[in-house]
Image (tube, helix red, strand yellow):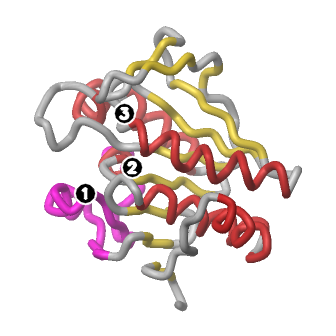
């Protein structure tokens, strides 16, 4: 299973790096799992909101699952999520991929990109607490849990909740044993504040 984490200018560094760490560690235990850092378009050097620069060699392909970070929403600058929503390219890609991937997940204000893609209408979702009103504007039923699992759309709250959602998804895909081993390795508790259908 190939998970692609999409980076774009102005992303929140921890939204990308923390889930990457979880998925990459899980892949060493469960070899059927693979994680890749990708970009939608543009040059391979991608700068985070805090100045961290990542060399992102690959463009979005045909992943089995898509992970979308947030970034730059709260500061009000036309970078990160606001810029990508206005530009429209990434929301279109997310909308197209959402019909073929196993799941689309987001952390923090990445949920607003899912909203702009039209895939949160009548779905349960969460985001950064500072953007809950905007999230409801996309037709989502807002939950205030750290992780909200609505089947093939999974969202998480602010920044560090990226670790929670990644551990939750590892558990969902390859089982408790792998997820718990990763949690122990990174000295982080297994997520408990999770809303999910039937749960």
Where in the figure is residue 118, as x and y percent of width and height?
Answer: 36, 51
Is 18 positioned to the left or the right of 142 in the image?
right
Which residue, as the protein is rendered here, is positioned at the far top?
43
Question: Is 92 rendered above or below residue 154?
Answer: above
C-alpha gap between disc 3 and disc 2: 15 Å
Disc 3 is placed on an element classified as loop
Asked if the magenta segment contains residue 175, the reply would be: no
Q: At 29% across and 31% down in the image, what residue appears? A: 80
Q: At 60% across and 64% down in the image, what residue appears? A: 167
On the image, numbered disc 2 is attached to which residue?
114
Q: Earlier in the sequence, mark 3 or mark 1?
A: 3
Where in the figure is residue 132, as x and y percent of width and height?
Answer: 19, 62
- Which stretch did the figure color magenta? 116-144
Number of other residues with Cα within 10 Å of mark 1, as a class: few under 14, some 14 to 19, many 20 or more: many
Q: Which mark is residue 11?
A: 3
Q: Based on the displayed image, in which of its 4 quarters is residue 50 positioned?
A: top left
Disc 1 is placed on an element classified as loop
Where in the figure is residue 35, as x and y percent of width and height?
Answer: 70, 41
Number of other residues with Cα within 10 Å of mark 3, as a class: few under 14, some 14 to 19, many 20 or more: many
On the image, numbered disc 1 is attached to which residue?
138
């Amino acid at each position: 299973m190939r998970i692609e984490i999409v980076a774009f200018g102005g992303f929140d560094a921890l939204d990308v790096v923390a889930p990457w760490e979880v998925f990459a560690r899980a892949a060493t235990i469960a070899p059927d799992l693979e994680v890749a850092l990708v970009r939608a378009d543009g040059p391979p050097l991608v700068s985070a909101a805090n100045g961290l620069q990542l060399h992102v060699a690959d463009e979005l392909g045909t992943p089995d699952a898509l992970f979308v970070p947030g970034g730059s929403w709260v500061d009000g600058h036309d970078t990160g999520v606001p810029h990508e929503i206005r530009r429209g390219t990434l929301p279109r890609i997310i909308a197209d991929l959402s019909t073929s991937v196993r799941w689309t997940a987001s952390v923090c204000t990445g949920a607003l990109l899912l909203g702009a893609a039209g895939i949160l209408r009548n779905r349960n979702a969460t985001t950064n607490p500072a953007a809950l009103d905007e999230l409801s504007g996309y037709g989502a039923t807002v939950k205030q849990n750290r992780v909200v699992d609505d089947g093939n759309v999974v969202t998480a709250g602010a920044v560090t909740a990226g670790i929670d959602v990644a551990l939750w998804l590892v558990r969902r895909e390859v089982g408790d044993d792998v997820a718990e081993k990763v949690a122990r390795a990174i000295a982080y508790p297994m997520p408990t504040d999770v809303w999910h259908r039937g749960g």
